[in-house]
Amino acid sequence: MQAMPVLARLRGARGLSQRQLAQRADLTVETVSDIERGATTKPYPATIRKLAAALEMDFDELAALLTEPDEVTA
């Protein structure tokens, strides 16, 4: 069984749906879904910044988690 993607774990830990996270981050649901599925492996820094703000996280912390997914602690 594959581990749950980092962004999905972080989102779920905050009780947010993909749609809710997308709205908070001013992104499309497709963008959130693509990152969670691994279809987008290197999101733009602006996208990470929006997601970090929506998840109330530090940009550097989220950027590191998205590039080092085995170290997530949601």
Image: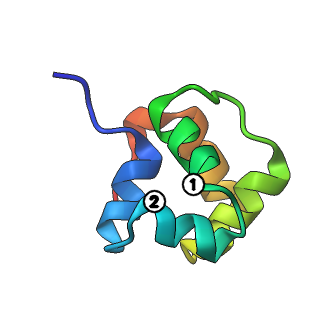
Instruction: Identify the residue at image location x=32%, y=62%.
Output: 12
Is 13 left, or right, of 27 in this rendering?
Answer: left
Mark 2: few, some, or many residues within 10 Å (few <14, many ≥20)? Answer: many
**Spatial separation of the CA atoms under disc 1 and disc 2:** 6 Å
Q: Which residue is mark 1?
A: 29
Q: Is residue 37 above or below residue 24?
A: above
Q: Which residue is mark 2?
A: 18
> In which quadrant of the rendered view does residue 64 lie?
top right
> In front: 33, or 52?
33
Quadrant of image for the C terminus: bottom left
> In which quadrant of the rendered view does residue 13 lie?
bottom left
x then y, percent, for residue 49: 76, 62
Residue farthest to the left, as pictured = 1
**Looking at numbered disc 2 in the image, what kind of residue is underneath it?**
Gln
Helix, strand or loop at label 1? It is helix
Mark 1: few, some, or many residues within 10 Å (few <14, many ≥20)? Answer: some
Instruction: Identify the residue at image location x=45%, y=59%.
Output: 18
Instruction: Identify the residue at image location x=29%, y=38%.
Output: 4
Instruction: Identify the residue at image location x=49%, y=65%.
Output: 19
Q: Earlier in the sequence, mark 1 or mark 2?
A: 2
